[in-house]
Image (cartoon, rainbow, N blue to C red):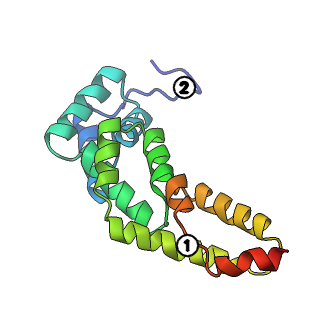
Amino acid sequence: MTLPGSSYSKSRITSEQALQKLKHYCGYRERSHAEARQKLYSLGLFKTEVEGLISRLIEEEYLNEERYARLFASGKSRIKGWGKQKIRHALRQERISEYCIIKALKALDETEYADSFRRQAGKKWDALRSEKNIFVKKNKWQQYLLQRGFEPALIKSWSFPGENNAGTAAD
């Protein structure tokens, strides 16, 4: 019996139908376990059914947390220009294990990562050329790079263009 206004109906989706939907959902692009779990709950399945289907998807290689973390990290680094700290935080929000996060960050191409940092650092430095106070300029530049997720040690290692003349310009 269904109650008026209730979202529960007699024609509830079966586990096999949900599995087929999830195979298609995971085949479209790489998904995290949390995304797949959320999708199954949105289809109206119960916890025991969801956990069983997640296990099957893992066994059949539709879900792989390590693969997801590697693809997520490389995409965010290359396309969005994120630093390792921002990627780590985003993966933690996706409830990815620390082991997979570490493997994903180690898999990033270091030269590509360094080039991305240099490109963004130089671009922001040039964008701040109208700032007269060198201390304000450096602070804005540093805050921008920290927001992008780059490590403080990497930021400190940067040598500012024309830094030798910076002290005389601020005086």
**Residue 64 is drawn in which quadrant?**
top left
Tell me which amino acid carries mark 2. Answer: Ser
Q: Which residue is mark 2?
A: 6
**Residue 15 is drawn in which quadrant?**
top left
Any part of residue 151 in sight: no
Which callout, 2 or 1, points at the residue further toward the start of the chain? 2
Tell me which amino acid carries mark 1. Answer: Gln
Residue at 73% from the left image edge and 77% from the top image edge: 166
The foreground one among 171 and 45 is 171
Vertical arrangement, residue 28 with respect to residue 131, above or below = above
**Residue 102 rendering spot, x and y as whole percentages:** 33, 44
Instruction: Work out which quarter of the rendered image holds the N terminus and state it.
Output: top left
The foreground one among 68 and 23 is 68
Residue 132: assigned label: none
Vertical arrangement, residue 60 with respect to residue 71, above or below = above
Residue at 36% from the left image edge and 28% from the top image edge: 45
Q: Residue furthest top?
A: 1
Label 1 residue SS: helix
Label 2 residue SS: loop
**Residue 80 rendering spot, x and y as whole percentages:** 49, 66
**Residue 31 rendering spot, x and y as whole percentages:** 34, 49
Q: Which residue is mark 1?
A: 120
Crowding at label 2, few (<14), some or many (≥20) Cα neighbours within 10 Å? Answer: few
Instruction: Work out which quarter of the rendered image holds the C terminus and state it.
Output: bottom right
Residue at 78% from the left image edge and 78% from the top image edge: 168
**Residue 9 rendering spot, x and y as whole percentages:** 43, 28
